Image: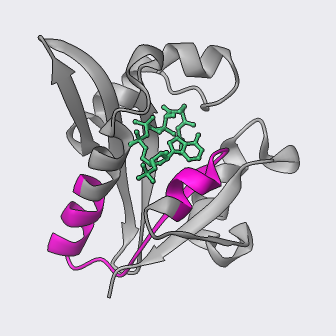
Amino acid sequence: MADYVAHGVLLPRSKSDICDNLMKFIVIELDDVVVACGALEIFNENLCEIRSLVVAENQKRHGFGRILVDKLIEKAISLGLKRIMALTYVPSFFHNAGFRTVPKEIFPEKVWGVCFKCCKFNDCDEIAVLKELS
Ligand SMILES: CC(C)(COP(=O)(O)OP(=O)(O)OC[C@H]1O[C@@H](n2cnc3c(N)ncnc32)[C@H](O)[C@@H]1OP(=O)(O)O)[C@@H](O)C(=O)NCCC(=O)NCCS
């Protein structure tokens, strides 16, 4: 994740935040090396979010991102959650997986629960995408 944070593609998360939320992550390993990860954040039964989705630069376009998104969707469905969203700079990747672009304002749980603490709150250029699960 650190490489993408450095390039401004991903918002920073502290080590303690990641440790606190470790059980929300799934990873893909190749030869004992983690090459991709993603996390499922649950707000309530109506909404969850794909967070911290990254594939190592040298492993992109091998289908790993899609595998992670599909697994996180599967997990959300198994928990009975109704909608899954993401904030992203690559909406077309998510469109490919059945998401559509929506206004961020339809997610008060995210905007007022998480985003307002973010340094980019007043200047957020990420795009919101949503997939209905039911
Ligand atoms: C976005 C990201 C997770 C995609 O992972 P990936 O493993 O390279 O993607 P996949 O190989 O699984 O691609 C799945 C599909 O999406 C398409 N795709 C992949 N990256 C894309 C992009 N940047 N823009 C548009 N489409 C993309 C692929 O062509 C493929 O399409 P297909 O099913 O028609 O063949 C990866 O590029 C990444 O880590 N980016 C930097 C971090 C980031 O932006 N994460 C998203 C934060 S929410």
Question: Which residue is located at x 46 percent, y 74 percent?
Answer: 131
Judged from this view, the residue extending furthest toward the front is: 62
Q: Residue at x 63, y 55 (%)?
A: 91
Q: Which residue shows up at 43% across the image and 62% down it?
A: 97
Percent across and percent down for residue 15 are: 41, 18
Q: Range of the magenta residues? A: 71-95
* 4 with respect to 23 (left or right): right
Q: Quadrant of residue 78?
A: bottom left
For residue 68, say whether it is visible: yes
> Does residue 128 belong to the magenta stretch?
no
In the image, taking residue 81 as reference, residue 132 lies left or right, namely right
How far across and how far down the image is residue 106, in percent?
66, 78
Q: Position of residue 102 (x, y in %)?
A: 68, 73
Q: Quadrant of the C terminus?
A: bottom left
Q: Is residue 114 visible?
A: no
Question: Against 63, is 83 above or below?
Answer: below
Farthest residue toward the bottom? Answer: 134
